[in-house]
Amino acid sequence: MGIGYKTSWLAVQDAAPEVVADALGLRHRRIVDWEGGTSAAYRQGVFVARPVSDWTIAHSRIHLPPGTDATDPSFPAWLQMLSTRLGDVQYFATDRIGEYHAWAKVESGGLTRAYCYIGERGEVPFHIGEPSDVERDLGVGQRWLEEGWQDWQEPEWDAWFDAMPGEDHVMRIAQNWSICPLDIPDSAVNAPGIYGFPSGVEPCYEP
């Protein structure tokens, strides 16, 4: 299996893998097939490939962005920096263990939508922009710790947690916005990709 759950990825339309790898500053690059690259990126580093004609995906469990995640205050600036090189950029992440789920997109240079939920901490670290149509249809991305949450009782908390996203919601949003990795027929991906490491990350695993 290629890219599935418990990971993060970028989706960029009509961008060559080499251009995306350059924007991410990947070093120690190797040309790797789809199976080897996606497997390696679950351990360390970043794998960039174009599995379908319209979309290039950059996949990494721990290095998108390097050394942090979507809860870091520098995350919006990182995404917008990528957008100056790549155009419109979308970000997705999901991990059921910590109930960490996030999605974001930069359009025309601006961060138009971003949402992140961490279930193990009961937090929505940030929410930017209005929910997209698919979020409204799924009933997620519309709540955070609103004013007065300190006085909530069990029914209010139950309703709040019921409105929080899960990993399948992230996949459905990705499918609507661009491409869901689960929809990529792994056996049909023939083109290799680029596996490498962002600045400050040294290889400890090779595919």
Image: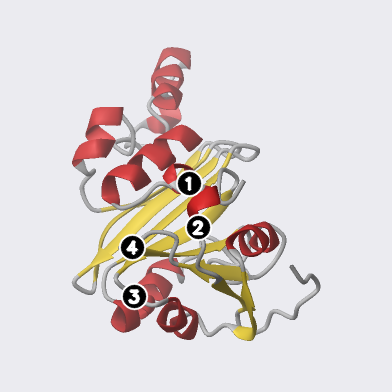
190 and 101: which is toward the camera: 190
- In-image side of 72 versus 144 (left or right): right
**Amino acid type of the residue that numbered disc 2 sits on in the rendered structure:** Val
In the rendered structure, which amino acid carries the disc numbered 1? Pro
Q: Residue at x 41, y 83 (%)?
A: 19
> Residue 29 in the image: x percent, y percent?
63, 83
Pick whichever of labels 3 and 1 is earlier in the sequence.
3
State yes or no: discs 2 and 4 in contact (Cβ < 8 Å): no
For marks 2 and 4, the one nearer the N-term is 4
Element under disc 4: loop
Above or below, 126 relative to 152: below
Gap in Å between the C-alphas at discs 2 and 3?
17 Å
Note whether residue 77 is visible.
yes
Question: Which mark is drawn over residue 53?
Answer: 4
Q: Quadrant of the C terminus?
A: bottom right
Q: Write down the quadrant of residue 145 in the picture.
A: top left
Q: Earlier in the sequence, mark 3 or mark 4?
A: 3
Q: Which mark is residue 15?
A: 3
Q: Which mark is residue 189?
A: 2
Alpha carbon separation for disc pair 4 and 1: 13 Å
**Which residue, as the protein is rendered here, is positioned at the far right?**
204
Q: Residue at x 58, y 61 (%)?
A: 34
